[in-house]
Image (cartoon, rainbow, N blue to C red):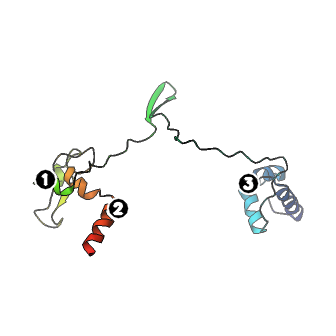
């Protein structure tokens, strides 16, 4: 299909009337919605006029309490019902115990091959050195680190900024 002068004029007319690219493509025949959009851009046509019949949609008023979807949904596919979590369970940061009060764990010196999901994956030492290992203590609250290393790794941004300012003074 080529864009003849007649088809271009019809496109301009329909565009000015506020028809969508899909509607224009259907009326022209033999062109896709994307072809109509491309031609509109090449012709530098201004934004479409709003159809006279359209009325502005009422705005949603947000309530004070946000709507929370159910935590689980059931989807049925054929003869199989699947339970799906609608929202992942958020990870919780360790309790706000001052880091100075936490006991520094003595590393269990676990190698990479011996690590599992329940072990702290905090690296200790230089990865190129022979004595490089991981902490290996029990993970805290399904995080990849033990409680002590979680406190080191997951510091709130405000605390880090405050500590940086204190060190500068």
In the picture provided, is 163 more to the left or to the right than 16?
left
* Label 3 vs label 1, nearer the camera: 1
Give residue 158's mark. 2
What residue is pinned by disc 3? Answer: 33
Residue 163 position by quadrant: bottom left
157, above or below 75, in the image: below
Relative height, residue 49 to residue 139 (above, below):
below
Q: Specify few, some or many for label 2: CA neighbours under 10 Å numbering under 14, 14-19, or 20 or more.
A: few
Spot occupied by residue 136 in the image (x, y as percentages of width and height) = 16, 50
Q: Nearer the viewer, mark 2 or mark 3?
A: 2
Q: Residue furthest right?
A: 6
Give percent across and percent down for residue 79: 49, 24
Q: Position of residue 36 (x, y in %)?
A: 76, 58
Q: Residues within 10 Å of mark 3 (few under 14, many from 20)?
A: some
- Does any portion of residue 146 appear in the rendered image? no
Q: Is residue 115 left or right of residue 43?
A: left
Q: Secondary structure at mark 1?
A: loop
Residue 129 in picture, x, y percent from top left: 13, 67
Distance from disc 1 to disc 2, alpha carbons, whole Å, reads 24 Å
Outermost bottom residue: 169
Quarter of the image that includes the N terminus: bottom right
Residue at mark 2 to residue at mark 3: CA–CA distance: 50 Å
Residue that badge 1 annotates: 103
Q: Residue at x 17, y 67 (%)?
A: 128
Label 3 secondary element: helix
């Amino acid at each position: 299909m080529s864009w003849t002068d007649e088809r271009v004029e019809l496109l301009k007319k329909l565009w000015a009337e506020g028809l969508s690219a899909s509607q224009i493509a259907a009326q022209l025949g033999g062109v896709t919605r994307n072809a109509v959009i491309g031609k509109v851009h090449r012709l530098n046509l201004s934004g479409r006029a709003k159809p006279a019949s359209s009325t502005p949609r009422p705005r949603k008023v947000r309530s004070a309490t946000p709507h929370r979807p159910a935590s689980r949904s059931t989807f049925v596919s054929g003869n199989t019902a699947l339970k799906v979590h609608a929202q992942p369970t958020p990870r919780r940061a360790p309790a706000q115990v001052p880091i100075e009060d936490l006991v520094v764990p003595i590393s269990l010196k676990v190698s990479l091959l011996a690590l599992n999901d329940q072990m702290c994956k905090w690296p200790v030492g230089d990865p190129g050195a022979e004595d490089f290992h991981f902490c290996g203590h029990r993970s805290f609250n399904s995080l990849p680190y033990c409680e002590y290393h979680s406190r080191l790794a997951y510091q709130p941004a405000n605390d880090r900024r405050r500590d940086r300012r204190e060190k500068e003074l």
